[in-house]
Image (cartoon, rainbow, N blue to C red):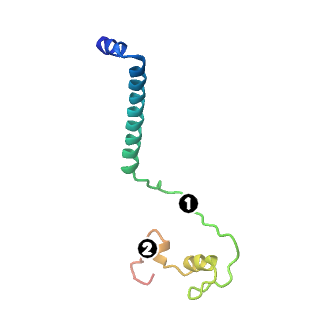
Amino acid sequence: MNIFLRIFKSFSKKERILFVGALVICILAGAAKGALFIYERTELVPSYGGSFREGMVGQPVFINPAVPVTEIDRDSARLVFSNLADLSESITYAEEGRV
């Protein structure tokens, strides 16, 4: 450590300013590169459980899946006429096979 201090003190004032500036730039670039590395390799996943609520602003005109007039009509028709398998977590059948 003592040798680094002696080398730093041997610099002129202009060289010290340039050295400190370059050191700050290297530290900031390293921090940015580290943050980018973490951001690229992180995958956000939702936590298990909880509930999901969807709200719509406005009033539906026609809840007809063939002729959606507005976005609210389209979204409502998707929820009302969606497949049961898409809405449920699991589907079980009775042993007789009737349900």
Q: Nearer the viewer, residue 16 or 80?
A: 16
Report x, y in % for residue 2.
31, 11
Report crowding for label 2: few under 14, some 14 to 19, many 20 or more residues within 10 A (C-alpha). few
Q: Is residue 64 above or below residue 35?
A: below
Residue carrying label 2 = 91
> Residue at the location (56% across, 85% down)?
65
Q: Is residue 59 above or below residue 34?
A: below
Q: Secondary structure at mark 2?
A: loop
Q: Nearer the viewer, residue 27 or 43?
A: 27
Report x, y in % for residue 63.
63, 83
> Residue at the location (48% across, 71% down)?
88
On residue 6, the disc is none
Report x, y in % for residue 72.
63, 76
Report x, y in % for residue 35.
41, 42
> Residue at the location (29% across, 13% down)?
3
On residue 51, the disc is 1
Report crowding for label 1: few under 14, some 14 to 19, many 20 or more residues within 10 A (C-alpha). few
Q: Nearer the viewer, residue 62 or 2?
A: 2
Q: Is residue 68 above or below residue 18?
A: below
In the rendered structure, which amino acid carries the disc numbered 1? Ser
Using the rendered view, name the quadrant where residue 29 is placed: top left
